């Protein structure tokens, strides 16, 4: 037996260190090559790091919340000599481990990936990512039965999806029953006055850091306006009545997005980034719409790129797609970056008003509050109308209060008379 020292690999894009979010193994555990051993967080994404070889864990370095520099010792494995030698043979100067899976990162066919896939194939082991291996295990699928289309026969996500789809058409797919869920153990009763300490690490730490910086560095100008969306609700209900059975219905958000795209043509200063290092405002011709999304890991902002080129239904579909990808940790890095303005909604929890925090380096964010029916004065008489508030925040350094108010008033006019959203300038 020999010992293999696994060092934190270069995770790309200038990463010099990573924060340990959680270990998946401990001393004494047996691990197979490609099993995820640790999850780390860089400034760009959460990354699951797989074991480069099979073996037994001798020791781990660092606790959740600790920062580990690239190239530092991460894990020591007791291995067969030939396994450790083979792993060293495929290492490159830039990557001392097989490719890590980044949540929100695209996977390219790098030389390291191809070498790793070839090595796995030569041993008769299926070459794929830890995420796909876990999906297959949960579904009871033997990956040896799945044809891989990636480099050196590596199984990629679309290969597993196609295999599962064939099963949905009546062909047998699972070769063993899926593991049954084990009910979670009940938390013990807490004594009166007891406290619980939760370490702020990983994505939650990153969210806290970025929101603190945005609130500290950006002088927010908040503006709340009430909308009468009775006509918008009528249009929405009509369009939803024409959908095929089972098709997802339109919410208010795609209408808001389409109206926002139209309005921003007259308020380009609100569709911009502030580059603090260069002291420059960068105005964007295209609208890349951030959609604030609550996920099990915390708040993420997936992006609908080129929202200004999309129709209402296309916007609705893309907003659903990127939001679901963010919630299930399947969003690519490109889908989580590049927004030029953000909309946020708490849905039925939207309340009367809110003060959303700007998603830096953007300079504006539009918040949607709850829609309710209530009595109002309409055309000189009391009537029941559907109303909703928009709560917006602007970077007051670069968007004057007058311009912010004028933009929201223009947005209000579009949404209160929704036909105007679809009429060209």
Image (cartoon, helix red, strand yellow):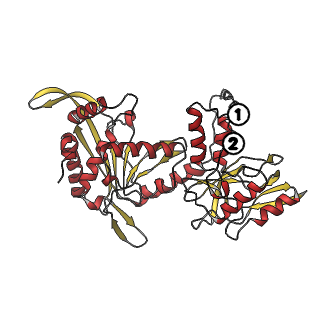
> Quadrant of residue 102 in the image?
bottom right
314 in relation to 74, above or below: above
Q: Which residue is mark 2?
A: 145
Q: Could you say which is closer to the camera, residue 199 or residue 141?
A: 141
Q: How crowded is the residue under tag 2: few (<14 C-alpha within 10 Å), some, or many (20+)?
A: few
Q: Is residue 383 visible?
A: yes
Disc on res. 175: 1
Q: Are marks 1 and 2 in contact (CB under 8 Å)?
A: yes
Q: Position of residue 200 (x, y in %)?
A: 59, 49
156 in relation to 363, above or below: above
140 in relation to 331, above or below: above
Q: Position of residue 124 (x, y in %)?
A: 77, 51
Horizontally, is 7 left or right of 272 in the view? Answer: right
Horizontally, is 192 left or right of 368 in the view? Answer: right
Q: Position of residue 134 (x, y in %)?
A: 66, 42
> Disc 1 on helix, strand or loop?
loop
Q: Residue at x 45, y 50 (%)?
A: 302
User: Residue reaching furthest bottom?
Assistant: 278
């Amino acid at each position: 037996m020999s010992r293999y020292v696994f060092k934190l690999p270069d995770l790309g894009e200038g990463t010099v260190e990573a924060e340990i979010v959680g270990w998946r193994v401990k001393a004494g555990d047996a691990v197979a090559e490609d099993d995820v051993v640790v999850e780390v967080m860089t400034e760009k994404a959460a990354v699951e790091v797989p074991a480069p070889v099979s073996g037994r864990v001798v020791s781990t370095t660092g606790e959740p919340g600790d920062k580990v520099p690239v190239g530092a010792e991460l894990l020591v494995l007791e291995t067969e000599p030939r396994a450790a030698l083979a792993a060293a043979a495929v290492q490159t100067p830039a990557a001392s481990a097989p490719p890590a899976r980044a949540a929100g990162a695209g996977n390219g066919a790098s030389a390291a990936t191809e070498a790793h896939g070839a090595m796995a194939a030569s041993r008769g082991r299926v070459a794929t990512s830890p995420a796909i291996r876990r999906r297959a295990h949960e579904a009871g699928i033997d990956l040896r039965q799945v044809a891989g289309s990636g480099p050196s026969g590596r199984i990629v996500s679309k290969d597993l999806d196609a295999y599962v789809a064939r099963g949905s058409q009546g062909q047998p797919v699972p070769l063993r029953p899926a593991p049954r869920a084990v009910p979670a153990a009940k938390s013990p009763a807490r004594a009166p006055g007891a406290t619980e300490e939760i370490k702020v690490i990983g994505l939650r730490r990153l969210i806290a850091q970025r929101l603190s910086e945005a609130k500290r560095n950006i002088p927010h100008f908040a503006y709340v306006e009430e909308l009468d969306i009775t006509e918008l609700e009528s249009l929405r209900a009509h369009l939803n009545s024409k959908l095929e059975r089972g098709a997802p219905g339109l919410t208010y958000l795609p209408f808001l997005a389409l109206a926002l795209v139209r309005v921003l043509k007259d308020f380009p200063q609100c569709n911009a980034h502030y580059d603090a290092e260069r002291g420059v405002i960068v105005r964007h011709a295209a609208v890349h719409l951030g959609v604030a999304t609550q996920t099990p890991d915390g708040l993420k902002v997936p992006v609908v790129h080129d929202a200004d080129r999309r129709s209402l239904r296309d916007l609705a579909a893309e907003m659903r797609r990127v939001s679901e990808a963010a919630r299930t940790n399947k969003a690519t890095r490109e889908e989580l970056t590049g927004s030029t303005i953000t909309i946020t909604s708490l849905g039925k929890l939207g309340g009367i008003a809110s003060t959303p925090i700007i998603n830096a380096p953007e300079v504006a964010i539009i918040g949607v509050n709850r829609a309710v029916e209530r009595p109002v004065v309409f055309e000189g008489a009391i009537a029941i109308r559907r109303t909703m508030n928009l709560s917006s925040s602007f970077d007051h350094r670069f968007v004057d209060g007058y311009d912010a108010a004028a933009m929201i008033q223009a947005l209000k006019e579009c949404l209160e008379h929704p036909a105007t959203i679809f009429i060209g300038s």
